[in-house]
Image (cartoon, rainbow, N blue to C red):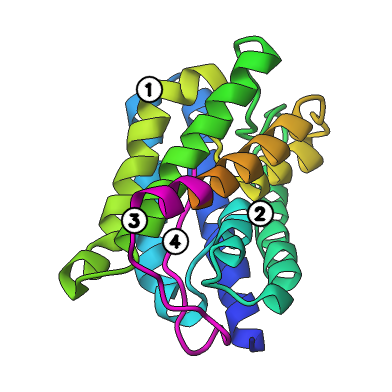
Amino acid sequence: MKLKHLIAEILGTFMLVFAGTGAVVINQASGGAITHIGIALVFGLIVTVVVYTYGESSGAHINPAVTIALWLSKRFPGASVVPYIIAQCIGAIAASMLLSAMYPANESLGGTIPSIPASYAFIFELLLTWWLMTVILHVTVGEKEKVVLAGAIIGGVVALEALFAGPATGASMNPARSLGPALISGQLSHIWLYILAPILGASLAVFTYALTTDSNANDVNEVEEIPEVQENNA
């Protein structure tokens, strides 16, 4: 792992949170000009952009749950897990700080606050992240043509999940994406849900992936050798 990998994760996660939660904040400030569909598309598109921008540098995980799952699947070195997660959180917090400075009257800063009971929201977030991570594991190995399209596929999944689950839970699927707005806005009552559920969901995806495929992904011993393509999250 090199410093450039951590910088890429900081910048990539910053882009994700600034664009995604920024769309939520601007939608509220403008009386709904972006719309729910627009917000979902912003999250999907920014994930796609980040994957193609930083995928070859850091793997563009931009999501602690993805980093942990890639480590569990032996595609990512254990020594790099904590530095990656710290970098992702730094990027998310920095984005929320900037949005707070630009929109000081906004109370939630695009944070994820469930509109359904916490237990149901937990199940939602676990399943959403399982689905996303399952796609990531499948499309980042195999035929070259499939891997080339991985960024668009992953971004599409993020947009799809945000479209139908956004009104229920915010469709986070990403502890860093939820942590940034929660810390800066001070709305921490449900942050446990958005940290634990995505990590469990992504870890479950590693297990179900092993059950449904005979192919063994290349182990990653050094980040600079074979960065794993990601994503996301909404």
Three-letter amino acid code at disc 3? Thr
Would you place residue 131 above or below residue 1 in this image? Answer: above
Image quadrant where residue 89 sits: bottom right
Q: Nearer the viewer, mark 1 or mark 2?
A: 1
Query: Residue under circle 2?
Result: 92
Whether tag 1 and tag 2 are in contact, CB under 8 A, the answer is: no
Give the SS element for disc 4. loop
Q: Is 225 in front, or is 218?
A: 218
Q: Earlier in the sequence, mark 1 or mark 2?
A: 2
Query: Residue under circle 3?
Result: 213
* Residue at 69 percent of width and 76 percent of height: 80
From the top left corner, tell me how far across and down residue 123 is, in percent.
58, 23
Q: Is residue 50 left or right of residue 84?
A: left
* Residue at 72 percent of width and 27 percent of height: 107
Q: Earlier in the sequence, mark 1 or mark 4?
A: 1
Whether tag 3 and tag 4 are in contact, CB under 8 A, the answer is: no
